[in-house]
Amino acid sequence: MDPASVAVTLCLLCSIVLIFCRWRRRVFNAFQGTNIPGPPPRSWLWGSLKEYWVPTTSDFIDKMIKKYGDTFGFYLGDHPMVFTKDIDLLRNVLIKDYNNFDEKGLIFFMHGIHPALNGTLIFSGGEKWKATRTCMSQAFSTAKLKAMMPAMSHSADLFLDTLKEFAEKGREVEISEPFADLTFDIIGKGAFGISTDSQVNRCHPIFALSLLTHPALMSGFAYNLFQSFSSLGSLLTPLVVLHDWIFGNPFTLLADQIKPVIERRKEDPSLRRPDMLQNLIEAEMVPNGRTMKKEEESATDETLASKPGHMKPNEVAVNSTFVFLGGYDTTRLTLSYWAFYVALYPDIQEKMRKEVLDEVGVQGELDYDVVSGLQYSEQVIKEVLRMSPPVSTWVCAPSFLNRSLCPRPPYFYYNL
């Protein structure tokens, strides 16, 4: 290679490196000129992503709170985030300025830009999110919850039998595992009419795949890579699709396990149940619970899905997946925290126990009406959620002009 070619090549390489460095420097200046403290990004490639997940998120947050206080900023990949547990700030975000924080935050960037997933409850926004949320909320009406109670009671009886067996053997257990089995069993039976027998056998394909799916959502080389370059937005969509075509996506793999159940429900009306899955199936064809028009009866799935309020066939399966994963994890954690607190405060445990026994003694069984009347138990659960809530994320609207808190939209708020 002649000297001129070498010189040109070196100049091009230096220019590319310079442009890349200036771009990354601009990406990581979101907190400049604000009063938000926080750790500087460990790397212009991934920010504080590694420290956030390793060893655990709780360790990272505890360390940052001790060093920077109740509110601090950091970079999850190249995405600016603000964590806060300041009561006044949370009140502003969740109440006073809520109209500026009406979009959920995204920590699953590579899944959020996937064409098969961005129309679902977790990753969608605006009218699409409202329509999906309305559809799912219909499954929690009084009539439908009453219809689910026998299945839930059966699962609860199996859970008590399991604990009794542990007690008789003097076996010490990590209570979150039986709670996980119970939660998945109830979701399968009550929300989808699927008997997973997860409390007896963890080998059911949907349950086994769910256990593998959850930790895979926020780990691995691909997750770290795409999260570190989230500022490129939808430009990375082709790479995400290519990655999932080669290696598979945990959401779509689990959705494939649920699709046969959906198809059987469509083909055989006798299999219909008053549960969440049926609501999603009906939303695929008829939005907002109205009666299907004649022209819609002969329309194709693709034609219907293009109309407002309709779900695409794939969205039904993927939204079902989110119910399994989201409901399973949050309920398991809440029950685990509840068990911890009532063990810590036996007087509260005894009050809850007495209330349940008194109500069951009057009604004769633990049905929907009895559960609805357990006011003290409800207060305890709400207090557990107040003390140990799930973490939620919100995106600051571009029009929000509080520069000290939102220097560059989109901006994420964590509340804990």
Image: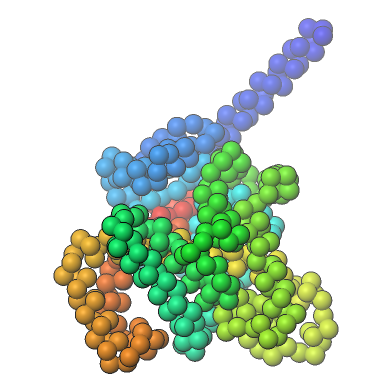
Task: Indicate left or right for 52 with 195 as reference.
Answer: left
Q: Position of residue 228 (x, y in %)?
A: 56, 40
Count of marks placed on residues: 0
Q: Position of residue 108 (x, y in %)?
A: 55, 52
Q: Residue at x 66, y 62 (%)?
A: 257
Q: How is the image coloured?
A: rainbow
Regarding residue 8, the answer to whether it shows in the image is yes
Q: Residue at x 69, y 67 (%)?
A: 259
Task: Indicate left or right for 243 with 44 as reference.
Answer: right
Of 414 and 322, the residue lying toward us: 322
Task: Indicate left or right for 55 with 7 as reference.
Answer: left
Q: Quadrant of residue 268?
A: bottom right
Q: Position of residue 160 (x, y in %)?
A: 36, 70
Of 182 and 99, the residue lying toward us: 182
Task: Indicate left or right for 313 with 93 as reference.
Answer: right
Q: Residue furthest front?
A: 169
Regarding residue 140, the answer to whether it shows in the image is no
Q: Residue at x 40, y 46 (%)?
A: 57
Q: Position of residue 66 (x, y in %)?
A: 26, 42
Of 244 and 399, the residue lying toward us: 244
Q: Quadrant of the C terminus?
A: bottom left
Q: Residue at x 70, y 57 (%)?
A: 115
